[in-house]
Image (cartoon, grey):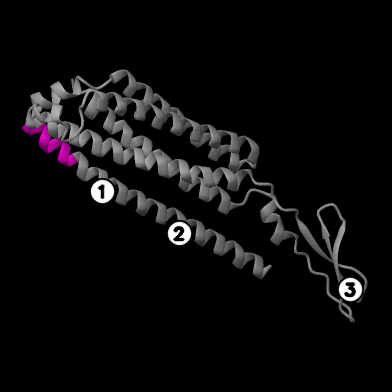
Amino acid sequence: MNGIAVHGMELHRDATGARMGMWLFLFSELILFGGLFLLYAVYRSSYPEDFHYAASHLDTAVGTINTLILLTSSLTMALAIGVLERGNRRLSSILIALTILLGIVFLVNKFFEWSAKFDHHLYPNSEELLLHTPGENVFYALYYSMTGLHGIHVLVGIGILSFMLYYVARKPRRALTLREGDPSSIIVQDGKGKKIWQHQTGEGVFGVDLTFIYNEHEEVTEGTTIKLENSGLYWHLVDVIWIFLFPLFYLIT
């Protein structure tokens, strides 16, 4: 009992530390984007008309679609965490895969949007853009740097969720139970009672039950849900940042 109690306290301590570490990381990300938002505010106050005109060349429909995609992905991510906490690995895996798919669709839309701008030679240091006003050049410099940095975060999020998809969907190992056999041997059985290993000891052995140790691979453990929760927090951060980027670049007209 004492060993189990200590094991439980260690799990709780690890869970608290993992959550705190993730929140500290998210805070550092907010500082990064907060500085970019402040820079945007300074330049927009300096070139209000140029920013207004340059923003009119962005496709508001594409920005709106991407916003809906990310909001939907936040919903599927939250549902994936909820169903995993209830022990449903299969449904959680489906929802994680759907979240990944929505993230990929977002990046594909962003790729085509950027491609359209490059076709019109509206990118930093292009001959076409250098003929425009300084304010418009600053606007597109901020547009590409901020949305590009956000796109990198989306790509990283997809990588994290891909790992979590494997981690959640993988086939759990069987529960093993170490039971006392005859007085001179130890027998290890799987969850179905099939003997898979036996060791001759030469003397009587006190029966030891290892089912508790191995069942953590059979059921959904606290460690698994914490990993998915932290992954979900990162994905929600990506969505929140886009919610700020969308009106700043697409709706200022």
Closer to us: 243 or 249? 249
Q: Residue at x 65, y 37 (%)?
A: 90
Count all numbered tags in the image, as a single digit. 3
Q: Nearer the viewer, mark 2 or mark 1?
A: 1
Closer to us: 106 or 216? 106
Q: Type of residue at label 2?
A: Gly
Residue 191 lies left or right of residue 146; in this view the side is: right
Residue bounds of the magenta highlight: 38-46
In this view, 132 is above or below 194: above
Q: Which mark is residue 17?
A: 2
Labels 3 and 2: the sequence-earlier one: 2
The residue beneath circle 1 is 31
Whole-percent x, y for residue 142 in the image? 20, 36
Q: Type of residue at label 1?
A: Ile
Instruction: Provide the secondary structure element on which disc 2 rests.
Output: helix
In this view, 152 is above or below 181: above
Quadrant that contains the C terminus: top left
Q: Residue at x 19, y 23 (%)?
A: 55
Is residue 32 part of the magenta span, yes or no?
Answer: no
Q: Residue at x 39, y 39 (%)?
A: 154
Residue 71 seen in the figure: no
Mark 3 residue crowding within 10 angstroms, few (<14) / some (14–19) / many (20+):
some
The residue beneath circle 3 is 185
